[in-house]
Amino acid sequence: MKEIFKFAYRNFFRNTRRSIISGISVAIAIAVIIFAYSYLKGITYSIIDNVVRLVSGHVRITTREYERRERMLPLSEALEVSPELVQTLDRDGVVAVTSRIKFGVMLGEGDMTIPALGYGVEPEKETAILGFDKRIVQGEYIANDDQAVILGRELARRLGKKVGDTLTIITRTAYDSPTGMNLLVKGIYATGLGGIDRSIFYLPLKKAQELLDLENRATEIVIILRDRGRAPALAGAIRRQFPDLSVTPYQDNLLLRSLTSAESLFVIFYFIILLVACSTIANTMLMVVFERQREIGMLKALGMGSGTVIFMLIIESGLIGLSGSVIGCLIGALFSYWLKFRGIDLTMFSSTASAEIPFGPMVYFAPTPAIILTAFLLGLLASTVVAYLPVRRVTKLDPARTLRTI
Amino acid sequence: MKIIFLFLLLVQSGLDQLTDPLAIIERVDKNTVTVAIRYRAKLEISVGGVVREKEFIGYAQGKDRSYMEFTAPARDKGTRFLKLEDGMWIYLPAVEKATKIAGHMLRQSMMGSDFSYDDLMENKKLKELYEIQLTGSDTAFGKECYVLDLNAKTEEVAYTRRKLWVDKESFIPRKVELYAKSGRLLKEIGITDFQRIGDRNYPTRIRMINKLRQSTYSEMVLTDIQLDAEIPPKIFTKAYLERK
């Protein structure tokens, strides 16, 4: 056995250039896989983080009817938020419980009206969730009692509003009566998320309740947990306690669910990259078998079985795969970890960042030892498996004939 | 004897059913379409069993000029609407300026009621807008009625088809069904009370049920009605709408 490894090792260096080229193709493939996987993981985390902060929290509570007709933003289906309810929800492991009112409105005057989404929020509590206090690019963040708004940068630009201006909101109350309010533009924020910056504004919850005739009511309650993995369990517990409410852990968010299924599709993509890379190994091994017919014939004549010869050649291929995988892992890991800390700014690709899927503008790669190890093993495995096809020709070689013909 | 015969003939003709739908609708229009009106109104809006009340005063002149100002409850006090030939404006005290309401909004719920802005502010003769057919007789709210089927002559009406139950005595449409172009029943109006003002019978208690909403109705009761009243022209101006 030791001899076989020795043979394979020596053969690896017999045509160093060819081995290196095959190794490089594996290395590139492995590096690309680690890079792509870390990038996509980074985007996934970015989307989860944004969805949790901006949309769903770790657990979101609404009335059942609101959940059913959410697309219509039915204010009439807002839920009663009593201090007792908030107290009940604020249990172990909960970082924040906050109420929000989401409402649709047309902003602007005359022919130039822009559809926008207003969020009534509890400004002080939201600093730990939305974190908009850190995303103000002009002016200031809102306080609980302000009659003021913060506007997304792009929305402010489209409305021609700047800090200090008055924004007039005219909409309908929960009872469908016309209502309006003049609000001071106190600050302008930028998240870098096109969809948010272009159409969302935030005002204090109290003012939203006053505007929409929703005293002590909110369209949703959002809960943030210390350990997000506990979200389904907490949602289950709240659901049992309040069976009339709709309680959703963030994992059930439609966008995040489709993201998980997209992730499995990418596995197929990685596999294709790997197959393409390994085809060079298969090609190399095919040439090896052709070149070494006489030698293989000699080995077989000396009593080495076909199986052993195949094994030896596969080990040789495995050595190419091993060296390629090691180098690929090193390159892939190095780049991915570098970009994990540095991040990529996607604003230069603003068209993609402004899509409705909330990720960016900074995407931090998310490589893990598991990703690197998987890629390494995949490279090693693929390089040995693909070698088998060309190498199995060995069984057909007749030692006498190969020795005679050459 | 001749006189008695003549008298009986007159009584007979009075009781006789009208057979000309145009004659019926003309009498309806005479009762309900005003040259000018001022009134007070109480609007009761019931949604899912929860009843809210609103009060307003209204002025209207001709086909296109209308003004409404809400006086109660406190939340709606000071909300004003002005409809002129070229559009409609709303004034909200909190906003302190008038805003034009988009055309399509006129067919939407007014103040959360089953009435639309158009329903309350329309003051046009049905005879001019619809082809009218008399389809028979029926009772509505215990009154003998002519049943008329009205189909719009133009596209520019809120309801393509109306079915009217016109009281044979008062010529008030006791019941009205309003249909969409698709044939779907949109709203149902019931007029349960009216007031004799001069030579007209004017509806004073109107109940509207929007069939597209669930378990709702709105009832409007009019008081202090002055028909053909003198209304100062300044009321139908944006300056008056925006007054402090």
Image: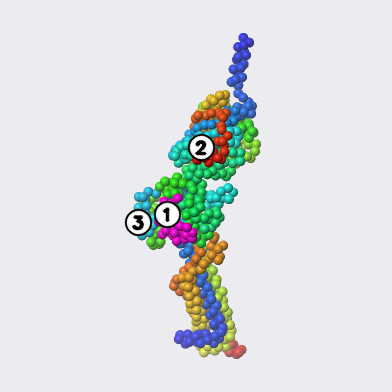
Residue of label 2: B69
Q: Is B106 rendered above or below residue A257?
A: above
Q: Nearer the viewer, residue B161 or A315?
A: B161
Give the image quarter of residue A402.
bottom right
Is the residue at mark 2 from the same chain as the one at mark 3?
no
Query: Disc 3 and disc 1: Cα gap in Å?
Result: 26 Å
Q: Which residue is mark 3?
A: A91
Q: Which residues are magenta?
A: A123-147
Residue ID for mark 1: A143
Q: Residue at x 55, y 54 (%)?
A: A160
Amino acid under label 3? Answer: Arg
* Residue A106 picture location, percent across and down: 53, 49
Gap in Å between the C-alphas at discs 2 and 1? 35 Å
Secondary structure of the residue carrying numbered label 3: loop
State the residue in front, B166 or B135. Answer: B166
| Discs 3 and 1 carry the same chain letter | yes
Residue A138 in magenta?
yes
Residue pictured at 53% horizontal, 31% vertical: B38
